Image (tube, rainbow, N blue to C red):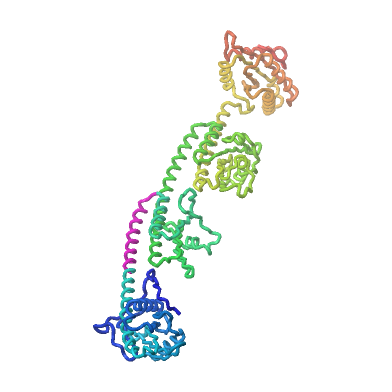
Amino acid sequence: MSGNLSSQDHSIKEPTLIITGRKLHSNPLSQIPQNGVILGLDINSDNDQLDILLSDSFMLWVEQLIVQFTSDLCDYFVCNGQGKLLQMSTQMESALSISTNQIGQAAEACFKSGQTEILNITGDDEALELSIVPIYSITNNLIGMIGIVASTAEKADLAAVIKGLALSFLPYILLQTEKAESQRMLVQKHQIEQESNKRDMLFEVTQKLHSMIDVESVLTEVIERIRELYPFVEVNLFLSQDNQNSSLPIKSLNFTSAEDDICTRAFMDGILIHNVANESHESEIAAPLSAKQGVYGVLHLYSLPEYFDPNDVQFIRLLASTAGSAFENAKLYEQSNFLVNELRLINEITTKLNQSLKLNEIFSFASSELINIFGAEFSCILQMDKTENEMIVQASNLPAMFHEKFSVDYGFSGLVYTTKEPVIISDYWSDPKIQSKLMEVTGSRSLIASPILVDGDVVGVILVCHRFPNFFSYENYKLLQVLSGHIGLTIANASLHAEVKRMVITDNLTGLYARHYLDEQVNYFQKKDFCGSLIVVDIDNFKGVNDTFGHQIGDKILIQVSGIIKTCIRDSDIAARWGGEELAIYLPQVSIDQSVRIAERIRNRVLNETNPKVTVSCGVSDWHWEDEKISVELLFYKSDMALYKAKHEGKNQIKIG
């Protein structure tokens, strides 16, 4: 039995009690009719709220007025319109002996008859009398019952008590009704003020967001405003784009279980989703950050134990939409700046690359610039050697990798070479399917790689890496593709320039240098060295070879002799076609004795290795820094005179000038 009179707090809920009627006459309390009392108001409320109203009115009534109508030998109770006992007051130190079942029987009889019921009850120690009076609204709806239990010793006064009982209780119902109505109006006023504040805040936030050109600032402003308005809410951001460096509570969308995840569904469908769990009083909202070009993310709000009402949901929807538009504007501004900077960077790099036509300088400059541009720790540029069918490291800031050679199917360079497609690796060590010496030696986890293409063919590969995972963005990946194209063009230009230069200074038939290049180099060495030697080689009876075998065989003999000469000298020596069937070799810092031995080696090999067999005559001369006169012409003159002597004395021999 609910008999205690402790106060109950229902202020946190908006009252649902509504007064739809007005006074029946000047006094809202009618006279007591035969069948009960009438409250001069029409009260429409759900059962729970009406029970609370009756209970609160009863407790207030008991505390303030009940002692005026009875002695200490009475108990009072109140029931709702269905006869359920709501409250009971115990005036005696030990309650009168009456059960809730007996009160329930009386309430049921009152409910059925619709009139005041007076019942005699036999208690444990004495006879009791129970009176219960129905209470009606102005529309004759039974809203409650008020009753008294007294000893028959008080029977003489009970009739008077019953009359006063019914009338004295009604003002307290009116008082509580007015309080409930006042509370409802205060709540409504508070809600109106809140909505007004939200509209003002939304207008202010809209202006502020659209004045921002930074993505981080836009997201920060939205989260701060939500936390200001809903301090009890947990806020998170789910973005579809890369924001690893953000300090905001940003999470990644889970696309693997889209059906079970509210944020992923909101992102995919582009609509706000509001979930409410009535049992646990949880409320969850996923609002998409959408704009003209698509959905950029989801604003997730989680609340416990308060609900989001429809006005809150609408406000959050508008705020998320505004944030989405501002996010898009800031992102477009950011991308335009990025593109401008990227174009400026490409222009600067291209200009610097084109300042040099030497491949080694181009590779070295490109490697260092790539590290600066991407903030990388290591870079490596490999060039394709088609003659050996392998990749050679031409530039790297890692000494251990320099001039390393790899097969065309090895590592990421092999993958890029084979597919002709760029590669981006977020975390190499999470699943190292491809073996890579660069990644293993440096301990790198992030990698971007791109082919260097020239006329559709892969001539090289660029590798850029860092030891942090997820270090390179998609923008870095795209920029490397663009830069590799410009590097490829520069390499092609440098290679073409080198080829043209080689053709200018090289004899097309023999592959030896041209005479003018030999003259230039001898003149250069005579200025810097202290000595040098010159060998002039002439093929004996070459005209007879042409006349006998034809000029094609004559050309073949020239090529054979030139090949023998190349294998008999150092890389630093200079072999040239001096004219016709005459060849010349300059040997920097080589004495006359060494030059004779080299000339003899050439003469002997020509005799034994040529087909058809031919012989050569050689004239050797040298110069020394102590000579009275030093010149290119004098050196060639002495060698020519020695050659003439060798030819005149029988050919197939060596003479010193």
Q: Residue at x 46, y 84 (%)?
A: 99
Coordinates of residue 49 in the picture (x, y in percent): 39, 76
Counting every numbered tag in the picture gives: 0
**Residue at far left of view:** 26
Task: Decide whether residue 190 is among the magenta residues.
Answer: yes
The image position of residue 607, as x and y in percent, is: 74, 21
Q: Can residue 406 be spotted in the picture?
A: yes
Task: Locate residue 79: give its quadrant.
Answer: bottom left
Q: Is residue 554 visible?
A: no
Which residue appears at 38% of the width and 61% of the height? 318
Quadrant occupied by the C terminus: top right
Q: Which residues are magenta?
A: 188-213
**Image side of residue 39 versus residue 130, left or right:** left
Quadrant hosting residue 343: top left
* Relative to 221, residue 341 above or below: above
- Which residue extends farthest right? 608
User: Residue 567 location, x and y as percent?
Assistant: 69, 25
Q: Please check the rendered image and state whether residue 481 is part of the magenta-colored stretch, yes or no.
A: no
The one nearer the camera, 516 or 154, is 154
Left or right placement of residue 406 versus residue 129 in this view? right
Where 366 sits versus 179, above or below? above
* Position of the N terminus by quadrant: bottom left
In the picture, measured across the screen, residue 519 lies left or right of residue 335, that is right
Pick the front one: 442 or 552: 442
Q: Which quarter of the figure has residue 111? A: bottom left
615 is higher (above) or lower (below) than 63: above
